[in-house]
Amino acid sequence: MILKNISIINFRNYKKLDLDLNDKINIIYGQNGQGKTNILESIYVLALTKSHRSFIDNNLIKNGEESAIIKGKLKKDISYNLEILLGKTKKQVKIDNSVESKLSTYIDKMNVIIFSSEDLELIKGSPGERRKYINLELSQLSANYYNALNDFEKLLKIRNETLKKINNLEEVDLNYFNILTEYLVNKSVFIYQMRNKYIQKLNDICPKIFKEISGLEGFNIKYKPSIDISSFEKENIKKILEETLRENFEKEVSAKMTIYGPHRDDFEFCKGNDSLRDFGSQGQQKMAVLALKLSEIEIFSDYKKTSPIILLDDVFSDLDSLKKNNLLKHINKNMQVIITTTDLDSIDKKLLKKAKLIHIKNGEVLQEEVKK
Ligand SMILES: Nc1ncnc2c1ncn2[C@@H]1O[C@H](COP(=O)(O)OP(=O)(O)O)[C@@H](O)[C@H]1O
Ligand SMILES: [Mg+2]
């Protein structure tokens, strides 16, 4: 798929920007703090309705403004005009100028994979970072996952409120509580299964790529749910989660929240049995996330029958030539790639020749001839 152009209004440090993009390689360059990452972020938000680097949507709106708009023309088998409006209190998406109320339908249209320095947080950061990541990836791949996750989150909120009431000795209908729990369990089962499948798929591809980049064997990703799941068959997960919740009812009442479930999942990046967070060097950790992202390109291309749009945020200056070449090898010739850099010299000359160059200064595109 190809993003033909993007136009943004009042997003981050941009008042207004209209940008036509090359079908293959685009390089956005300029000094630090000028707005390079903001452009990639706007493309990410256009695709996923959420940012990869901010949990708070209001940060995306230009300071002092009320709302931001991002529009883009996406070309796949047919073309789509996608649009997202980010208001202080509301978010609205449109496909071909008509409002789409189902976010899952919208998110399904455009797929992006971003490589950035924040990726390292996947290894070093909290379990919440890893869950956010897998949720975003699976939501792009499966509308059913996105919907199940949304339902789960709503149910979880209500169940937690109900647990609080029980703790405060307010009158609570326990039948109602049990039905809530049953609904929550059913949604959880699906989420567990999808996450397990996705991690298995990653484990089919990741170790090979990790070896190519690092020369090291034994890379794997371990799924660590908060309950001990012996096998991922539907009935089995259901039974285990039901039992766990039953046995821990009092504990959850005094904690005033649901302690067991997919919202407490974690994943671990390992070499053999050793966690790369605890035992891996910074270099190995970087290679692990690179391998992860490269595997995703394969999974997405395979599953969606068209390649995702690749966003590379300032990653070249940080990689040695072996990793650069590996990265480029995996980015198929037909994929659209949008790269940011402060330093054009860090970019392969052949790549530079083919690329559209976009010079950014203080939230504006500078028009100039560049010698390649
Ligand atoms: N909501 C906002 N409103 C206005 N400016 C913002 C907002 N969020 C970030 N910025 C500005 O965007 C700039 C950083 O842009 P960024 O794309 O991260 O830079 P870089 O070119 O280094 O990638 C900073 O100058 C920052 O002050
Ligand atoms: Mg940046």
Image (tube, rainbow, N blue to C red):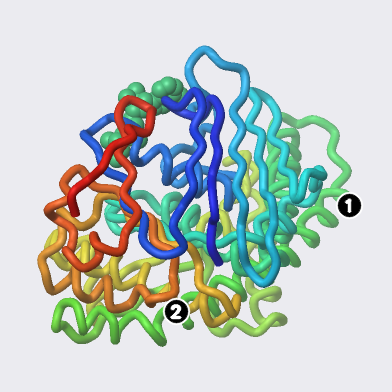
- 54 to 341, vertically: above or below: above
The quarter of the displayed image where residue 80 is located: bottom right
Judged from this view, the residue extending furthest toward the top is: 64
Circle 2 sits on which residue?
Answer: 298
The quarter of the displayed image where residue 247 is located: bottom right
Compute the Cα span from label 2 to label 1.
47 Å
Name the residue type under label 1: Asn
Q: Is residue 266 visible?
A: no
The residue located at (35%, 73%) in the rendering is 331
- 192 to 305, vertically: above or below: above
Q: Is residue 140 visible?
A: yes
Seen from the viewer's position, the closer of residues 89 and 76 is 76
User: What crowding class fits label 2: few (fewer than 14 Cα within 10 Å), some (14-19), or many (20 or more)?
Assistant: some
Mark 1 and ligand 1: say if the CB distance to the nearest ligand atom is below 8 Å. no
The spot of residue 228 in percent (x, y) is 51, 73
- 110 horizontally vs 281: left or right: right
Circle 1 sits on which residue?
Answer: 175
- 184 horizontally vs 111: left or right: right
Seen from the viewer's position, the closer of residues 167 and 56 is 56
Tell me, for residue 186, which label it has, or none.
none
The answer to which of marks 2 and 1 sits earlier in the sequence is 1
- 22 to 53, vertically: above or below: below
The spot of residue 25 in percent (x, y) is 36, 61
- 298 to 309, vertically: above or below: below
User: What crowding class fits label 1: few (fewer than 14 Cα within 10 Å), some (14-19), or many (20 or more)?
Assistant: few
The residue located at (70%, 30%) in the rendering is 90
Name the residue type under label 2: Glu
Split into quadrants, the picture shows ligand 2 in the one at top left
Helix, strand or loop at label 2? It is: helix
